[in-house]
Image: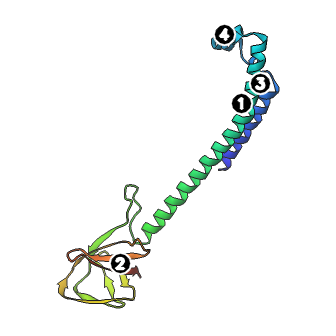
Amino acid sequence: MKRGMVIGLFLACSGVAIAADEFWQQLTAEERVAAGIDQLTTEQRTVLDRLAARFGKEGARHAVAIAQEKGRQEGQAQAQQAAQEKKKASIGLAPREDDETEVVRTHIMGDFRGWEGKSTFQLANGQVWQQLPGESRNFPKMVDPEVEIRPSRAGGWKMTLVKEGLWIRVKRIR
């Protein structure tokens, strides 16, 4: 952002310099011929100088505004990337650029019969998750059921029993 402001300030200063001198006089003879300025009348050159002066002032303001906006956007992109990496690290996944959603797909270790209020779940990937206080549900005995843990739209995380399609809200404790 500071870099953008420096560039904008430079452009603003150069715009004032252009406004102070006659624009067409700052061009080389070759540039004047190539642009056709060498064929202008005195009145046309005066108009051109006024236009260049106005552009120098307004263009500098515009350049500063663009530089500030670009700096703001870069800052937002960096903040979003840092937040995404922090969020992914909180569930134990290495950040991946191609992954917009954080999903852990693994198995609950051993026998599983359901959840009761604050049940904890030891997962095959070494993580331990705990049910947030709430409902109880019993299932027939399952061994190493597959689960998927993903962010909840309401905030936090939800763990879904893949085969059954049932889910509960959870938090990671290890």
| Lower position in the chain sequence, tag 2 or tag 3 | 3
- Residue at 82 percent across and 27 percent down: it is 20
- The image shows residue 160 at horizontal and vertical percentages of 29, 76
| Lower position in the chain sequence, tag 2 or tag 1 | 1
Report which residue position mark 1 lands on.
Answer: 55
Dot 1: few (<14), some (14–19), or many (≥20) neighbours within 10 Å? Answer: some
- The image shows residue 26 at horizontal and vertical percentages of 75, 19
Dot 2: few (<14), some (14–19), or many (≥20) neighbours within 10 Å? Answer: some
SS for tag 1?
helix
Residue 65 seen in render: yes
> Residue 28 or 169: which is nearer the viewer?
169
Alpha carbons under labels 4 and 3: distance apart: 20 Å
Amino acid type, callout 3: Arg
- The image shows residue 151 at horizontal and vertical percentages of 39, 71
Q: Which mark is residue 33?
A: 4
Amino acid type, callout 4: Val
> Residue 5 or 91: which is nearer the viewer?
5
Amino acid type, callout 2: Gln
- Is there a contact, CB below 8 Å, between mark 1 and mark 4? no
> Image check: 84 left or right of 146?
right
Alpha carbons under labels 2 and 1: distance apart: 62 Å
